[in-house]
Amino acid sequence: MRILSQLSLLFLLLAAACQSGNPPKIATDQNGNEDFPEFLGRFFTDTAFQFSRVAFPLKYVAGDFDSLYTRGDTVVLTRENFPKQIPPPENSAEVRQEMKKIGDMVVERLIVMNAYYTERRFLLRDGKWYLIYYSGLQGSI
């Protein structure tokens, strides 16, 4: 009986430890807007956070190099078929990342082998960043 009570206590302690509460907040600037690089880092590492910051459904027109769809098809990405976003590889000769801030929007392009690209657009809404556009692999830039 003593072993059972010790195991129960251990289970309760482990369950309490797993409930870490709210994740840390993202740092903000003087206007109360989230810091974009910090947001992006969390976006890539926390799947639940990532899904909470995507403006579903996302739509784009499939290009020649989007192997899952026919060129010209309208692709609709939902929670069910959205590919988990991962950070671009660092120091890669094959993949180059370009970021451009336009007002309250950041446009990111991942250029693969100087011939293909994927684009993501993030919009600052009420002080928080959201993914509002995603394109699959597109052809020649």
Image (tube, grey):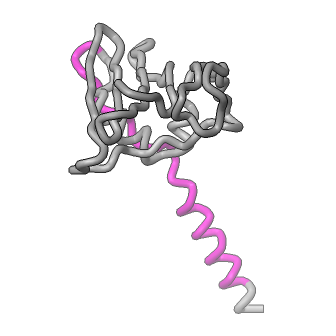
- Residue in the image at 32% along x and 49% along y: 89
- Residue in the image at 29% along x and 35% along y: 114
Q: Quadrant of residue 48?
A: top right
Image location (x, y in percent) of residue 97: 28, 35
Q: Is residue 101 left or right of residue 65?
A: left
- Residue in the image at 66% along x and 19% along y: 74
Residue 95 against residue 107 in the figure, above or below: below
Q: Residue furthest right?
A: 1
Magenta span of residues: 5-31
Nearer to me, 136 or 14: 136
Please state, as top left, top right, bottom left or bottom right, where the C terminus lies in the image: top left
Q: Quadrant of residue 77?
A: top right
Image location (x, y in percent) of residue 32: 31, 17
Q: Is residue 122 left or right of residue 80?
A: left
Please state, as top left, top right, bottom left or bottom right, where the N terminus lies in the image: bottom right
Image location (x, y in percent) of residue 63: 54, 26
Magenta-drawn stretch contains 8 = yes
Nearer to me, 112 or 100: 112
- Residue in the image at 29% along x and 10% along y: 102
Magenta-drawn stretch contains 62 = no
Q: Is residue 127 left or right of residue 2?
A: left
